[in-house]
Amino acid sequence: MLSRKDLVSQPIYLDRGELAAKRTEIKRYLNLTWESYESLFDTLKTEEAFYARPCSLRHPLIFYFGHTATFFTNKLVLAKLLPKRINPKIESMCAIGVDEMSWDDLNDAHYDWPSVGQVRAYRNQVREAVNDLIDRVEFSLPIDWQSPMWPIMMGIEHERIHLETSSVLIRQLGLDYVQASDLFPICPDQGEAPTHNPLLPVPAGSIEIAHHDPAPHYGWDNEYGEHHAQVSEFQASQYLVSNQEFLEFVEDGGYERAEFWDEEGDRWRQFSPVKHPTFWLSRSEGDHQAWFLRCMTEEIPMPWNWPVEVNYLEAAAFCNWKASQTGRPIRLPSEDEYLRLRDHTQAQDQTDKANLNLQKYASSVPVDQCEMNGFYDVIGNVWQWTMTPIYPYEGFKVHPLYDDFTTPTFDNQHNLFKGGSWISTGNEINGSSRYAFRRHFFQHAGFRYIESDAPVQTEFSTYETDALVSQYCEFHYGDENFGVANFAKAYADLAIELAQSDDDLSKRASLSVLEVGCSVGRASFELAKHFDQVTGLDFSARFIQVANQLKQTGSVLYTLPIEGEIMDFKERSLTDLGLQAEAHKCQFLQQDASNMKPHFNGYDMIVAANLIDRLYESAKFLEDVAARLNPGGILLITSPYSWSEQYTLKANWLGGYKDSQSGENVTTLEGLHRILDSDFKRLRDPFDLAFVIRETARKYQHTLAQVTIWKKTK
């Protein structure tokens, strides 16, 4: 049985040790992580609690219970370490939707959630599969991004993130749904806070980060690269802001006074029904109001000496109020200023003192309990908001197995918080981690303030610099090259012509189209000229982010290589392309084409351009496609048939190989007929459609995609 001691994780070193011992260590880390996560859900009182929505911006907890196991399956299939999916139905529902990104689908009507028992059984299957992989996968030290052990570590650390985020969701459920657990005790030390929170000096110094692969510990992509900064001297509050200190802001009408809130904060302030921190509760007791605090599974009388927990907007408003009260330049620290404070106090070398890693309590502790060279809680207790939106370090690269971890947050709308909380473990507390949340989101997060008149950068370039994404922005929205028509527009025009000329489709009052593999969205916008509803799906969050940005703002900025390090800066707009007026008809969602959610159905046309030879399981997509089309619907496929084991195991190729029995060549067209003929008839002879992709000013790819058009007959 899991004990409190088991919840405290020890760091896994990836660059040292002996292979057999490392294998054993990773296996133990996996299983303790697995059991710790499941023990968190034991605080749910009934199965009904798994299906209650903690808040409107998140799925019910049954999603998160299945999500971490689904993540393992998805990444291990992509890494070709698992030969096939374990439970496609659960995996289609529990893959995407953990944050309120514009491509998340939080519509309850789209989900027929599995039972708790079914998810438990699925988790057991995944756990067994991952344990088996750890036993037999061949690897060497150091474990780096290319190691087959890396996606296993990725899954473990991902589950540890959700250990924390799920604890926040449980904290937002009604008390009727939760129960206390001996594994997660609340700190009994509750009383008055220090009467004064002095500002102490932090000397000037430099920040030097050079974090590269391989590294001693597992890291997420945003941690890697180079960053160097000089930080001016400043003063920082000795303690985190306590509930008692924040009460002064509340009692002075801070939530009613717009002058303390920026534009975003004021919108949230007016929207929020409560005028105090979310986890505070006010009740009438006789002739006075009594304050209580909601912990993870209990409500307790307000511990005034614990740190307040607020979102970024509330923390910033408090600082503005404090500045007005004192006449001093009080504000939140930048990320660099936080790092300077951490270096100055040597806090990262004192993790044993801190309230983190579940080594003390499953709650905050008093702000004057964990001292670190004159300051308190430099790490641990609660996360600490900074003014800095997350941005990439110099040399940032996306890990190919997880492109949607960080890049969607490079939008100047997700602020970094630092230091970890009482339930932060694993990568979250290794000293290199960089986590960011939307400014109105709640975690176990509070803040400390500083005094400084040094400027802080709060806007970072939103030019798309990812080489692949920039290349596809130009491919979709850039200039035509060598007289070859824009490919996305060309196949969209073809789809419209088919809809107009087809006897079935031309008579329908309203038409819907699904584009699978929409990339950065040009064809979907073109399709909206004729179709009434357009849904664009893509596996890449980076591509979907660009498509949604274009829908919302009408333009995209990106860099394009000319030669070597010389870059051109491009801006393209939907208005200039005549696409703005119909953009509202489009929705863009992240989705796995080989395992799409069931509710993607009822379409009059499905378009799959240059997709089938990039899927890990192309046959699965094609076998399901008829059920997603209305009777008489049309399927439009284009592909250069450039099969590669980089994307698709050879056993899953539709064509481009020799038959093992006869030795005869098998073409992709033959493979398409083999799967589609039972539900479709081919409308035309196949033909080629050319496209050109620019790489640099003098290097281009010229390719021919074969077009096949199919009409549903059943």
Image (cartoon, helix red, strand yellow):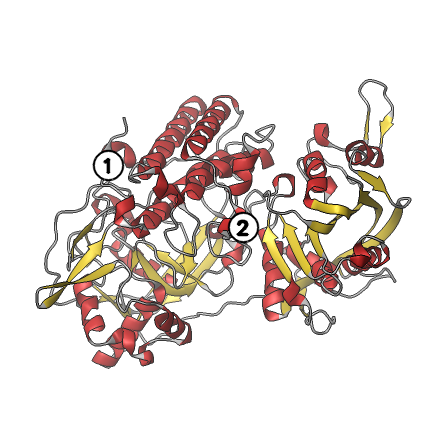
In this figure, which residue is indicated by the disc labeled 2? 404
Q: Position of residue 1 (x, y in %)?
A: 27, 26
Q: In the displayed structure, would residue 599 be above or below residue 374?
A: above
Q: Is residue 626 left or right of residue 287?
A: right
Q: Position of residue 506 (x, y in %)?
A: 81, 58
Q: Residue at x 79, y 54 (%)?
A: 505
Is label 2 in a helix, a strand or a loop?
A: loop
Q: Foreground residue, 527 or 569?
A: 527
Q: Is residue 657 left or right of residue 49?
A: right
Dot 1: few (<14), some (14–19), or many (≥20) neighbours within 10 Å?
Answer: many
Q: Position of residue 400 (x, y in %)?
A: 59, 44
Q: Please state which amino acid type lies under the numbered disc 1.
A: Leu
Q: Answer with mark 1 or mark 2, whichever residue precedes in sequence.
A: 1
Q: Position of residue 311 (x, y in %)?
A: 34, 62
Q: Residue 183 has which mark?
A: 1
Q: Quadrant of residue 382?
A: bottom left
Is residue 430 visible in the rendered image? The answer is no
Q: Please state which amino acid type lies under the numbered disc 2.
A: Asp
